[in-house]
Amino acid sequence: MINVAQNAKKSSYILASLSEEIKNKALFAVAENIENNKNLILEENNKDLIEAQKLLDKGEITKAIYNRLKLNEDKINVIIQGIHDVIKLEDPVNKILSVTELDKGFELNKVSCPIGVIGVIFESRPDVVPQIASLSIKSANAVILKGGREADYSNEILVKIINEALKTVKSFPENAVSLIKTREDVKETLKMDQYIDLIIPRGSNSLVKYIQANTKIPVLGHTEGICHIYADEFADIEKAIKVSIDSKIQYPAACNAVETLLVHKNISEKLLPALINRFKEEDVLVKGDEKTLKICPEIEKATEEDWRTEYTDKIISIKVVESVNEAINHINHYGSRHTDCIITENIENRDLFMNLIDSAGVYCNVSTRFADGFRYGFGAEVGISANKTHARGPVGLEGLTIYKYKLYGNAQTVAEYSGNNAKPFTHRKL
């Protein structure tokens, strides 16, 4: 692992100097090599599926994990298109973010730059490999990947195909994309703070918490996706039903699927019977507080634990609230700062909700499932962050860069700008 980390660090220095032309050439080569090896990828993926079926039969993995693991030609085409989408994106590196004149002929530039070496630890989905690799290449970061054991064959062939393509590009460094396999490798990786600059976990709550507790390396990610929808007293009923159903049903296992629905008391008797009936048509298990049960007594009773639960399944909990402020307080108390939505036609309540909810994504009248890098136009994402520093929400290219200050002068000294006869700074924005 020391060799892997050291080699990735050396590669990161070369990557930082590459032109956009070389990086795009590398991405074209990767996309072409994936296209040329579709059958091989599917053969290796099938090996994973055979082993995963055994784990599923034993109850060691869920059906959702099995489904995420499966590749087909359509998914591979989406992977290839995703790489081409990243190629089209503006180069995020070496952009001048601001220029300040400190004095005549003395300028301070704030310039974007790569983070360096990124470790990404994820579960199940092998399509994550080319997504993250393409974003890392474009943003000039070296990346060390660790996937779940259930996708070993798929991950290994994808990394092999990617590296075969990168070797054909002149000036592109070796070891820009690396793969590690075992839990012991992960433990060692988490100790490599002198070589690895950022860890991004994509997976279960327990995985993220384990990583956060066992490394000095900065961690970008979220532990849970306890997303909410608040149906305000001024909500449009049809919009509330449409958005709530999509947020729960479109992909229940996703971290941006809604888990708790809050409904204003003044709209509850009109909205809840129709909405709960729609949930039942979609085989969703509905739980509710006492006020919800009075309106729809056939549903299960919600407990305190339900408000803290990420179901990642066809289950939803519902609570009737007295006001928009109660909804805001509930979400800020029980939520995971991921994505939360208000359904309303009232501008004042909309703005109050969107300003006071402490989440990475705050929506009005749209599905929480839009919390996604591809849907945001980032080309792809390396993960979703609920952090309040550096990057937040779906993390695309810009989230994989940081900045440095470049100071250009002509033998200026601090002594000239100090003391009784100090020269004044101009501090003029250019």
Image (cartoon, rainbow, N blue to C red):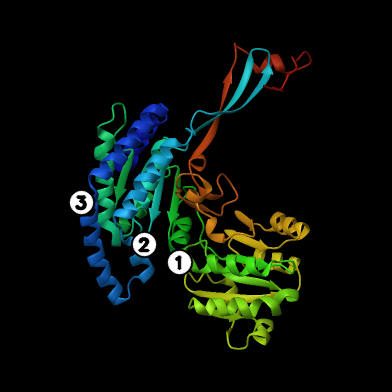
Q: Residues within 10 Å of mark 1 (few under 14, many from 20)?
A: some
What residue does disc 3 label? Answer: 40
Residue 181 is situated, as x and y percent measured from the top left of the image, at 28, 54
In contact (CB < 8 Å): disc 1 and disc 2: yes
Q: In the displayed structure, does residue 64 sit left or right of residue 333?
A: left
**Which residue corresponds to the image point at 29% horizontal and 54% vertical from the top-left?**
73
The front one of 94 and 372 is 372
Q: Are marks 3 and 2 in contact (CB under 8 Å)?
A: no
Disc 2 packing (10 Å; few <14; some 14–19; many ≥20): some
Q: Earlier in the sequence, mark 3 or mark 1?
A: 3
For the point 52% across and 37% down, the residue is 402
Name which residue type carries label 2: Arg
Residue 253: which disc? Answer: 1
In the image, residue 188 above or below residue 242: above
Q: Considering the image in quadrants, where does the C terminus appear?
A: top right
- Of the residues shown, which amino acid type is indicated by label 1? Ala
